[in-house]
Image (cartoon, helix red, strand yellow):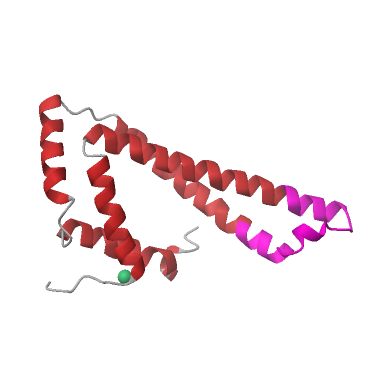
Amino acid sequence: MTEEPCQCSDCQRFYKEHDRLIREFPTFKQQQELNWASIQSFRTLCSKVTNELQRQLSERESSEDIGLEEKHITDIEITETLDELESVNAYLYSIEALMERVFDTKISKNIELKFKEIASELAPDPLNMDRLMLNRLFHQTPDSPDKKNIN
Ligand SMILES: [Zn+2]
């Protein structure tokens, strides 16, 4: 287990972001709120885009002349994206349900101080093991073929 941490630009961006989120949100409660907001904003954006693409697709079906500004996205591209976004929305919905459970947990003031203390030790460390393991997961997720088409 003496693997060198990956130094590609994606991973370096991840290390930075990971540390920043610990530094700027060093309590349990802040992490709860941060993650809730992040799931919600992701869902909001995805479903807005989904609605917009559905609208475009049905407009195309009902009329022959497509506005020039919309022609750069093909029907196939829209249909495929809608399929993918449908899965993503279902996953995000599941995560949201789990996040609600995480939200049920309340942490005492004294333990919150412990969180802050650990956070300040953790964030400046560029070779933190937990983070490296997290990042391995993060790094693999986008193009991992076995994670697609689960249903
Ligand atoms: Zn990498």
Q: Is residue 65 left or right of residue 35?
A: right
Residue 71 coordinates in the image, percent (x, y): 77, 63
Q: Is residue 144 left or right of residue 137?
A: right
Residue 75 coordinates in the image, percent (x, y): 73, 63
Residue 31 coordinates in the image, percent (x, y): 28, 38
Q: Which residues are magenta?
A: 55-81
Q: Residue sitting at 11 percent across and 48 percent down?
A: 121
Quarter of the view holding residue 35: top left
Outermost right residue: 64
State the predominant SS element of the stretch in magenta: helix
Q: Nearer the viewer, residue 14 or 79?
A: 14
Residue 148 coordinates in the image, percent (x, y): 47, 64
Residue 9 is inside the magenta segment: no
Up the image or down, 21 lies above or below 11; here it is above
Up the image or down, 25 lies above or below 1; here it is above
Quarter of the view holding residue 101: top left
Looking at the rendering, the quadrant in which ligand 1 lies is bottom left
